[in-house]
Image (cartoon, rainbow, N blue to C red):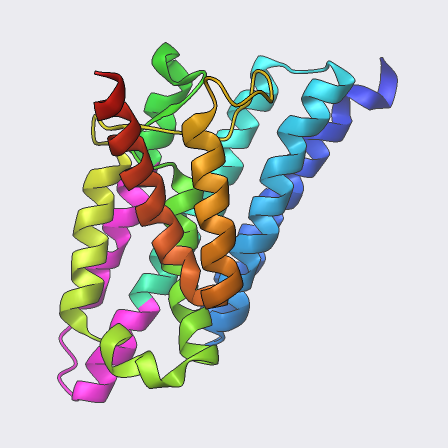
Amino acid sequence: MGIKKHIPNAITCGNLISGCIGISFCFEGDLFLGAAMILVGATFDFFDGFAARMLKVSSPMGKELDSLADMVTFGVLPAVILYQLLLQVELLADTHTTYLPYIAYLIAAFSAIRLANFNIDERQSDGFIGVPTPANALLIGSLPLILRYYPEFSPYILNKYLLIGIAVVMSYLLNAEIPLVSLKFKNFGWKGNEPRYTLIGVSALLLIFLQVAALPLIVVTQVLVSVVFRKSND
């Protein structure tokens, strides 16, 4: 098998390194590039599994490494972004509350719980229960991107109640017993894949019309599509 078995793990390490670089950008004050590294990490995260399946070299070690990389890029990095946004709110308000921004690190803690559960929960082989960490990270990472491209939204985004709400609500949704649709296809026919194609179609339309502002709405769409199709099947 030689070097072939190491290719997926090397790609996974690209995900982890992307998260580390993103955290560095955030503490240097560049939240835009920090958020962009979530997108880079998500790309690596997609291709490591794809490469493992294509090369037929999946392994328990690769699964564990993937979770460790996800913890950095989709757990710690979004928590740091949220922390820095809350810090900006504090500085703008000139309140300098010492504890408020640290609420953001709930995201890191509950992401760790989710990733640990995911590895031992056999129900999540074909779908998700609770919001996946990459989806949560993209939602939080979209905030600096929206601030860059749509500065008129800054009064709404740089709002401590919104940011605290995101930290608390998303921490809950990461581990909520809510079955969510995933994009794992066993076949590409319409039957059985209706929620997947619906999610892809709505997400594509949102991206076309709203661009980066669509990212948080795509996460909301994933939840809504999952709930709607689940109820229709009951």
Find the residue positioned furthest to the right.
2
Could you tell whether 27 is left or right of 129 in the image? Answer: right
The answer to whether residue 134 is above or below residue 86 is above
Residue at image x 39%, y 84%? Answer: 151
Residue 89 position by quadrant: bottom left
Q: What segment carries the magenta color?
A: 84-111
Residue 121 position by quadrant: top left
Query: Which quarter shows the N terminus?
Result: top right
The answer to whether residue 81 is above or below residue 122 is below
Q: How many numbered marks appear?
A: 0
Asked if residue 91 is among those painted magenta in the image, a careful observer would answer yes
Residue at image x 28%, y 48%? Answer: 107
Residue 199 position by quadrant: top left
Q: Position of residue 215 (x, y in %)?
A: 42, 57
Query: Which quarter shows the C terminus?
Result: top left
Choose between 212 and 193: the one closer to the eye.
193
Q: Position of residue 5 (x, y in %)?
A: 77, 20
Look at the magenta stretch and give its main secondary structure: helix
Could you tell whether 111 is left or right of 214 in the image? Answer: left
Residue 171 visible within the image: yes
The answer to whether residue 164 is above or below residue 183 is below
Residue at image x 18%, y 48%? Answer: 169
Q: Position of residue 92 (x, y in %)?
A: 23, 87
Could you tell whether 168 is left or right of 1 in the image? Answer: left
The answer to whether residue 218 is above or below residue 22 is above
Asked if residue 145 is among those painted magenta in the image, a careful observer would answer no
Residue 24 visible within the image: no
Choose between 2 and 45: the one closer to the eye.
45
